[in-house]
Amino acid sequence: MSKYELLWNWIKENGTDSFRLTFDEMEKIAGLPIDHSFLNHKKELLNYGYKVGKISLKGKTVSFEKVQRNTDTRSE
């Protein structure tokens, strides 16, 4: 289980194509401080259908984007 699983599940259930959260909002959702390890764990979010977009250290925000899945089901 990832230490950010609560945050990843919240993002997945949000369902919005793209949105931004502040570090404070993320900490409240995750129930733990957002620290440098977030950078190492962010790739886990792909398993939930999202990716981390821009991280603004100055604005203390992170943008998230829904990953577009290939829905081409043509048979050859």
Image: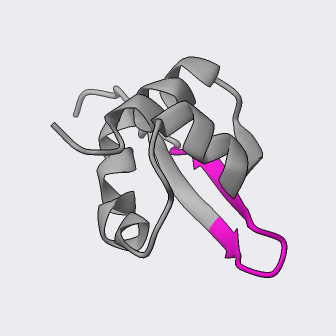
Q: Is residue 44 visible?
A: yes
Specify whether residue 66 is painted magenta: yes
Residue 62 screen position, x and y as percent: 68, 60
Q: Nearer the viewer, residue 27 or 63?
A: 27
Specify whether residue 9 is painted magenta: no
Q: Answer with left or right where residue 11 lies relative to residue 76.
A: right
The colour scheme applied to this rendered structure is one colour
Residue furthest right in the image? 59
Q: Is residue 71 visible?
A: no
Please state, as top left, top right, bottom left or bottom right, where the N terminus lies in the image: top left
Vertical arrangement, residue 57 with respect to residue 6, above or below: below
Who's the residue at 62% across and 22% down the image?
15
Vertical arrangement, residue 9 with respect to residue 41, above or below: above
The mark total stands at: 0
Please state, as top left, top right, bottom left or bottom right, where the C terminus lies in the image: top left
Residue furthest bottom in the image? 58
Q: Nearer the viewer, residue 31 or 66?
A: 31
Vertical arrangement, residue 20 with respect to residue 41, above or below: above
Residue 40 screen position, x and y as percent: 31, 71
Residue 11 screen position, x and y as percent: 55, 32
Vertical arrangement, residue 74 with respect to residue 69, above or below: above
The overriding secondary structure of the stretch rendered in magenta is: strand
Q: Answer with left or right where residue 46 lies relative to residue 27.
A: left
Q: Nearer the viewer, residue 49 or 33?
A: 33
Start-end of magenta stretch: 54-67
Residue furthest front in the image? 32
